[in-house]
Image (tube, helix red, strand yellow):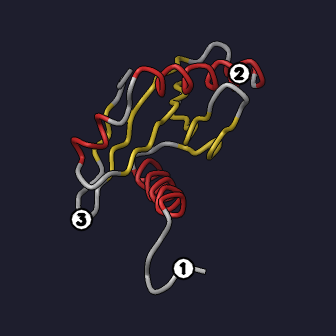
Amino acid sequence: MMAGNAQSGHAKGLAAEKQAAVYLKLKGYSILQMRYKTPQGEVDIVARRGRLIVFVEVKLRAALDAAAEAIHPQNQHRVRQAAALYLAAHPEYTDFDARFDALLMAPRRLPRHIENAF
């Protein structure tokens, strides 16, 4: 059991993903799925706006620049792999446009939403 207000990195990450989903909803996106896990990788948030499916990688760090640096090529590859499996499992989105976004978060900062991040 953790003492005081200490939160594990995992718990902070889950909280950041929930905050990111609220932020995206406020921007007009519908959240289709949170934490879509596959053997090849995971997508933090799958969202839709109109005929656009967006695969969102959420990164929480002490600073927004550090969050951006945490989205490295190996991480991008895993998200792309999971996104391909999501689309294969959801043929209703076959003719939708797809995009990979990043939502960067840091304490006491507004989120930074980067469209077409990778």
Picture quadrant of residue 19: bottom left
Quarter of the image with the N terminus is bottom right
Regarding mark 1 in the picture, which secondary structure is present there? loop
**Residue with the mark numbered 1:** 2
In the rendered image, the quadrant that contains the C terminus is top left
**Distance in Å between CA atoms under marks 1 and 3:** 23 Å
**Badge 3: few (under 14), some or many (20 or more) residues near its Cα, within 10 Å?**
few
The dot on residue 97 is: none
Mark 1 → mark 2, Cα distance in angstroms: 37 Å
Q: Which residue is mark 2?
A: 85
Amino acid found under the numbered disc labelled 3:
Arg
When the figure is inspected, residue 50 is found, relative to residue 64, above or below; the finding is above
Q: Is residue 23 left or right of residue 67?
A: right
Q: Residue at x 67, y 25 (%)?
A: 40
- How many residues crowd around disc 1 within 10 Å: few (fewer than 14), some, or many (20 or more)? few
Residue shown at 38% from the left, 32% from the top: 71
